[in-house]
Image (spheres, helix red, strand yellow):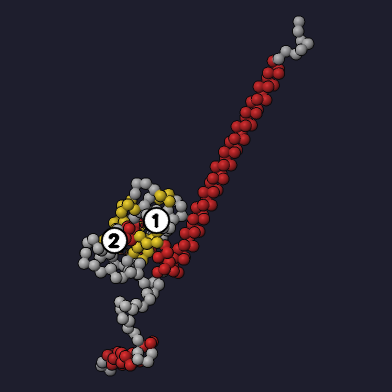
Amino acid sequence: MLGEGIIKGLLETARNFAGSYVSKERLTTVQYPEEREPLPEASRVFPFLVYDGSDWLAGMRCVACQICEKECPPKCIYIEKSADKKPDAVGKPQAYPTRFDIDISVCMSCQICVEVCPFEAIKMDNKFELATDDRFGGLLLDRKKLAKPNEYYHQIHPTEAAEVDARLAAERAAVEAKAKAAAEATAAKAAAAKAAAEKVASEKTATEKASSEKNTPSAGGGA
Ligand code: SF4
Ligand code: SF4
């Protein structure tokens, strides 16, 4: 029937309007911004950079590999890599970004940067009240503005953040076990080299002693 959809919609609106006086379920609107609906865990707006610990720069997980910069469809990520290195989230020495900017006026919230990052360093934020009249300075976010602690990541995406933490802990344990095994192997090699050197020295001493005894004349052997 022509207009059936419109009539159904109007009936639903009328049901919600009348029902909202007796049932909170029917109150489908909130008085934003005073009231806010909780955001779903999977909601996403623009990316942010995760850091561990209390120092955003020292704890930044990003190693400036630039994969996200290359893969970002509208090319709104700008990265410059450091010349020196610092430990990454699993303890390996890595470079870090001396510049990491995202132009959120261009970002299309596709999340590709998050999916391609091998270091769990970039995640999607759910903050959406970012309007500003400063088109260039206000919407080009630098690394300090983008940096947010791991605790914040847990707050907005708890399930995903717990999985990431478990994976990073396993990787960290593997790196530590590898370093320990390498240190033990080096120590064993050094001990074996020391034992071999001591054996050579002892054999040399024994040979010299035998030679010296052979060349010494006996007490009753005079003319
Ligand atoms: S969400 Fe998409 S568009 Fe935005 S920075 Fe990441 S890859 Fe680029
Ligand atoms: S955010 Fe991830 S993919 Fe992008 S540069 Fe940093 S480590 Fe590489």
Which percent across, then down, holds residue 143? 32, 57
Mark 1 neighbour density, 10 Å: few (under 14) some (14–19) many (20 or more) = few
* Res 79 quadrant in image: bottom left
The furthest residue to the front: 34
Query: Mark 2 = which residue?
Result: 141
Residue 171 seen in the current view: yes
The furthest residue to the top: 223
Which percent across, then down, holds residue 3? 26, 92
Rendered residue at 36%/72% (across/down): 43
Which percent across, then down, holds residue 24? 38, 87
Q: Which corner quadrant holds the C terminus? A: top right
Q: Along the line of sight, which residue is nearer the eye, 145 or 215?
A: 145
Q: Secondary structure at mark 2?
A: strand
In this rendering, position of residue 163 left or right of residue 193: left
Rendered residue at 69%/15% (across/down): 215
**Foreground: disc 2 or disc 1:** 1
Q: Earlier in the sequence, mark 2 or mark 1?
A: 1
The furthest residue to the bottom: 1
Q: Along the line of sight, which residue is nearer the eye, 133 or 15?
A: 133
Which percent across, then down, holds residue 216? 71, 15
Residue 119 seen in the current view: no
60 over 25 or under it: above or below: above
* Res 32 quadrant in image: bottom left
Q: Hey, what amino acid is under mark 2?
A: Leu
Q: Hey, what amino acid is under mark 1?
A: Asp
Quarter holding ligand 1: bottom left
Query: Mark 1 = which residue?
Result: 55
